[in-house]
Image (cartoon, helix red, strand yellow):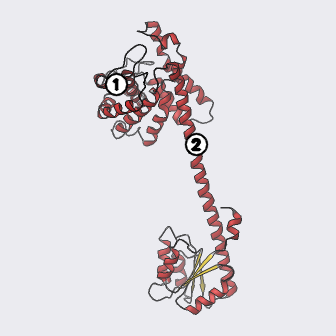
């Protein structure tokens, strides 16, 4: 809301007193300057305060039959809906301890009767001005928070689209992979979610990290853009020399993402995860993988999870060099790879959700690649 809207809006004052003549006196003093509401008891005052049209300030008598002003103030300050409404005690109680009690309960001011009209007008004006500024800043802070959240959503969406678009570069080089990056994204999130409560993974697989793994997964094979067609698209078994070239896609992917990171002034967590995943998803639990021959827990969790996801998808999909494989046989191969190719804990998690892997594969089915 603009500042002008706040300055032109007439503020509301609730007068609470059990004596109608006191309400009449205060109303005549304030009417014309503010919207006036009145209540002759604490219950009615609370009803007005908790309504959809609450007052901006409350002038509250203390000595009332039934619920006194202290109790009204306590209840107002105990509720988030009304705790920011300024309360001014307007009372004949003149003892220091009475005034102290009022301030301890959250009142902003304490005016003793008989009142001085100029004093009442000045103090009401002061506290309403403070309330107006407070409301303006609160609304603007809310607007700014919502705007930041909206822009963060936009940035996240742009990141997601960029990751998929970059991953599709590798996909375009090998047109039979089709929805491979979409399926592996889903597999990775499913496996990570299944593993998050496992004692070996709970420190790493937070909700935030699972989201980063999902966001980063499309770049796991980005390095294939650097593999020549005669190797990437070869029909039949690769020679030793050709396989050595194919193996470089992990280092090419790592280098490409690292170069992108250098262009940024600050580190970006999802690119760090993407670089790690691209570089290590071909490592094997027993140390026979590449590019570094890492083994066991030395392999980053991101690489271990992607390894199972990537192999499953490669098995069930047709490639230029092989036919597709039934889901059940692919599951058997991954089961047999526990402790050699794959982290045994990752395999256990995979077996628990294998049926959901099949559902993901069917949802993102490739008519040419399956």
Which residue is at a point 46% across and 10% down the rendered structure image? 234
Q: Which residue is mark 1?
A: 342
Which residue is at a point 47% across and 9% down the rendered structure image? 242
Quadrant in which the C terminus appears: top left
Res. 259 in view:
yes
Q: Work out whether 257 lies above or below 237.
A: below
Quadrant in which the N terminus appears: bottom right
- Residue 269 position within the rendered picture, expressed as x and y whole percent measured from the top left: 52, 36
Foreground mark, 2 or 1? 2
Name the secondary structure under disc 1: loop
Compared across the picture, whether 77 is left or right of 289 comes to right
Judging depth in this view, the residue of 291 and 328 nearest the camera is 328
- Residue 223 position within the rendered picture, expressed as x and y whole percent measured from the top left: 52, 21
- Residue 266 position within the rendered picture, expressed as x and y whole percent measured from the top left: 60, 36
Kindly indicate the quadrant of the structure image that contains residue 117.
Answer: bottom right
> Tags 2 and 1 in contact by the CB under 8 Å rule?
no
Judging depth in this view, the residue of 205 and 94 nearest the camera is 205
Compared across the picture, whether 8 is left or right of 240 comes to right
Which residue is at a point 63% across and 70% down the rendered structure image? 131
Q: Work out whether 337 lies above or below 243.
A: below
Judging depth in this view, the residue of 4 and 323 nearest the camera is 323
- Residue 332 position within the rendered picture, expressed as x and y whole percent measured from the top left: 28, 23
Report the label total: 2
Q: Residues within 10 Å of mark 2 (few under 14, many from 20)?
A: few
What number is the disc on residue 150?
A: none
Q: Which residue is mark 2?
A: 154
Determine the residue located farthest toward the bottom in the rendered image: 21
Q: Work out whether 308 lies above or below 58.
A: above
Q: Work out whether 179 lies above or below 205.
A: above
Res. 245 in view:
no
């Amino acid at each position: 809301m603009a500042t002008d809207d706040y300055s032109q809006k007439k503020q509301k004052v609730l007068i609470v007193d059990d004596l109608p003549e006191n309400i009449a006196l205060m109303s005549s003093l304030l009417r014309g300057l503010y919207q006036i509401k009145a209540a002759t008891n604490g219950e009615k005052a609370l009803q007005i305060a908790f309504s959809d049209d609450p007052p901006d300030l409350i002038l509250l008598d203390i000595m009332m039959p039934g619920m006194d002003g202290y109790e009204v103030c306590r209840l107002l300050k105990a509720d988030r809906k009304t705790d920011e409404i300024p309360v001014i005690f307007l009372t004949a109680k003149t003892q220091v301890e009475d005034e102290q009690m009022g301030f301890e309960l959250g009142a902003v001011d304490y005016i003793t009767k008989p009142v001085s009209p100029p004093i009442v007008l000045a103090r009401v004006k002061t506290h309403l001005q403070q309330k107006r500024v407070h409301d303006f800043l609160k609304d603007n802070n809310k607007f700014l928070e919502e705007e930041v959240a909206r822009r963060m959503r936009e940035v996240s969406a742009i990141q997601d689209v960029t990751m998929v678009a970059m991953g599709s570069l590798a996909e375009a080089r090998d047109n039979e992979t089709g929805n491979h990056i979409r399926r592996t994204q889903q597999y990775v999130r499913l496996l990570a979610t299944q593993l998050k409560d496992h004692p070996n993974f709970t420190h790493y697989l937070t909700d935030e990290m699972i989201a980063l793994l999902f966001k980063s997964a499309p770049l796991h094979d980005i390095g294939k853009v650097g593999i020549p067609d005669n190797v990437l698209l070869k029909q039949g078994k690769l020679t030793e020399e050709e396989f050595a070239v194919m193996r470089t896609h992990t280092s090419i992917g790592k280098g490409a993402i690292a170069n992108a990171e250098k262009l940024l002034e600050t580190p970006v967590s999802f690119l760090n995860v993407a670089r790690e995943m691209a570089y290590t998803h071909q490592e094997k639990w027993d140390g026979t993988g590449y590019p570094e021959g890492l083994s066991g827990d030395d392999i980053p969790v991101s690489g271990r999870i992607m390894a199972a996801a990537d192999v499953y998808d490669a098995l069930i999909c047709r490639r230029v060099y092989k036919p597709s494989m039934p889901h059940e046989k692919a599951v058997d191969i991954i089961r047999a790879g526990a402790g050699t190719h794959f982290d045994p804990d990752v395999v256990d998690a995979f077996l628990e959700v294998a049926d959901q892997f099949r559902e993901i594969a069917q949802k993102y089915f490739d008519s040419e690649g399956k």
